Image (cartoon, rainbow, N blue to C red):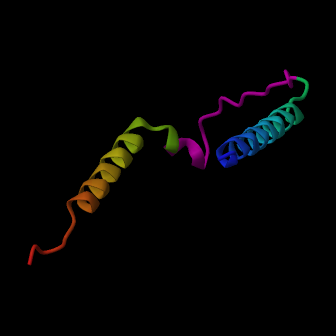
Amino acid sequence: MKKSNFLSKIQVAVLALVTNFAVVMANAQEKAADLNVDVNVDKGGSAGWISNPIVWIAGVIILVLIVALAARGGGSKA
């Protein structure tokens, strides 16, 4: 009954390989910090409506209504 021991060794090897791959991918994305940040505080233009809190509140209400109607279901209990 050495099969379970063999499987656990394979699982440990695969886990180590996946972990090393994740570390390599995380390190590959590091770069020097870009500290030249330009913040545009101009609220004008066509994108100004999205920063309006009333739009967000209306969107949340509509989303809650859609979720409530979907969860309620429309099937008959025949």
Q: Which of the two residues, 66 or 53, is positioned nearer the viewer here? A: 66
Residue 38 picture quarter: top right
Q: Could you tell whether 49 is left or right of 67 in the image?
A: right
Q: In the rendered view, would you say 73 is above or below 55?
A: below
Q: Could you tell whether 1 is left or right of 10 in the image?
A: left
Based on the picture, tell me whether residue 45 belongs to the magenta stretch: yes
Q: Could you tell whether 25 is left or right of 56 in the image?
A: right
**Quarter of the C terminus within the rendering:** bottom left
Q: In the rendered view, would you say 75 is above or below 56?
A: below
- Residue 40: where, in percent of width, then height? 71, 31
Q: Name which residue lies at 51% across and 43% down.
A: 50
Q: Which of the two residues, 39 or 46, is positioned nearer the viewer here? A: 39
Q: How many marks?
A: 0
Residue 23 picture quarter: top right
Magenta residues span: 33-49
Q: Name which residue lies at 30% across and 58% down.
A: 66
Considering every residue shown, the one lying at the far left of the view is: 78
- Residue 52: where, in percent of width, then height? 45, 38
Q: Could you tell whether 54 is left or right of 26 in the image?
A: left
- Residue 4: where, in percent of width, then height? 65, 45
Which secondary structure dominates the residues rendered in magenta? loop
Q: Which of the two residues, 47 or 33, is positioned nearer the viewer here? A: 33
Residue 24 picture quarter: top right
Based on the picture, tell me whether residue 27 belongs to the magenta stretch: no
- Residue 29: where, in percent of width, then height? 85, 35
Q: Name which residue lies at 10% across and 73% down.
A: 77
Considering every residue shown, the one lying at the far bottom of the view is: 78
